[in-house]
Amino acid sequence: KRKSVNIKKVRLTGQNGQQHECHLTYDIIEIDGQHCLLSFYEKIKEENKIVDPPREFPAEFNYLVDNSLQGVCIVQGDMHIFANKRFAEIVDKTIDEILETSPEDFINTLVHPDFREIVGSRHASRIKGGQAPHHYELKIITKSHGERWLEFYAQQIRYNGKPAMLVTVFDIT
């Protein structure tokens, strides 16, 4: 069965009546045998689509991210600064290994050789503020030399006041 993240561009109305364009990322997850909706709204702030996530997340939100079927990581500058458990499982690395690996090394060691050039050029374009597809599929090679297909979504955000990249992935093997 193919898993996929659901992403939609939506228009929301705030309490003051002002409308905002947002990206809605959502999926159904299971917590203690109960099906729950996990969703993220990201306000589209400017033409370059940089968004401002909340500065602090409540414990409930952290619980949901840590138990999501969706792999989530944040890249800022030349470092991974966050990865959830599911991201680590999908890419077959520990969270510490992810946080110690630069995005470039990650691309060169994890991304399948058939996809390295295109993924590397898209990453470089995003870092420079250029245009690159936000949503696509790619193949990786795990530590144990297995191949996995991922559905990949990257969105520029501001994290702690600095530009960053929010990356979400699903194993669609």
Image (spheres, rainbow, N blue to C red):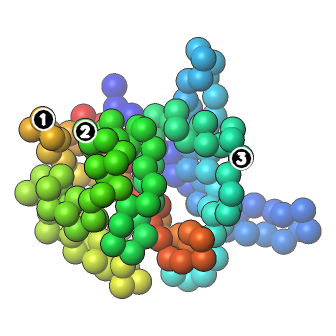
The answer to whether any part of residue 10 appears in the image is no
User: How far across and how far down the image is residue 127, in percent?
Assistant: 36, 79
Disc 1 residue type?
Ser
* Residue found 68% across the figure and 57% down from its top: 56
* Residue found 14% across the figure and 68% down from its top: 117
User: How far across and how far down the image is residue 101, in percent?
Assistant: 27, 59
Q: Quadrant of residue 51?
A: bottom right
Placement of 65 over or under 101, stated as above or below: above
Crowding near the residue tagged with mark 2, few <14, some 14–19, many ≥20 C-alpha atoms within 10 Å: some
| Disc marking residue 92 | 2
The total of numbered circles placed on residues is: 3
Placement of 119 over or under 65, stated as above or below: below
Crowding near the residue tagged with mark 1, few <14, some 14–19, many ≥20 C-alpha atoms within 10 Å: few
The answer to whether any part of residue 58 appears in the image is yes
Please name the residue that numbered disc 1 is placed on: 144
The quadrant the C terminus occupies is: top left
Callout 3 secondary element: loop
Please name the residue that numbered disc 3 is placed on: 58
Per the model, the C-alpha gap separating discs 2 and 3 is: 28 Å
- Left or right: 30 as drawn, with respect to 141: right
Callout 2 secondary element: loop
Placement of 91 over or under 24, stated as above or below: above
Q: Do the residues labelled 1 and 2 touch (CB within 8 Å)?
A: yes
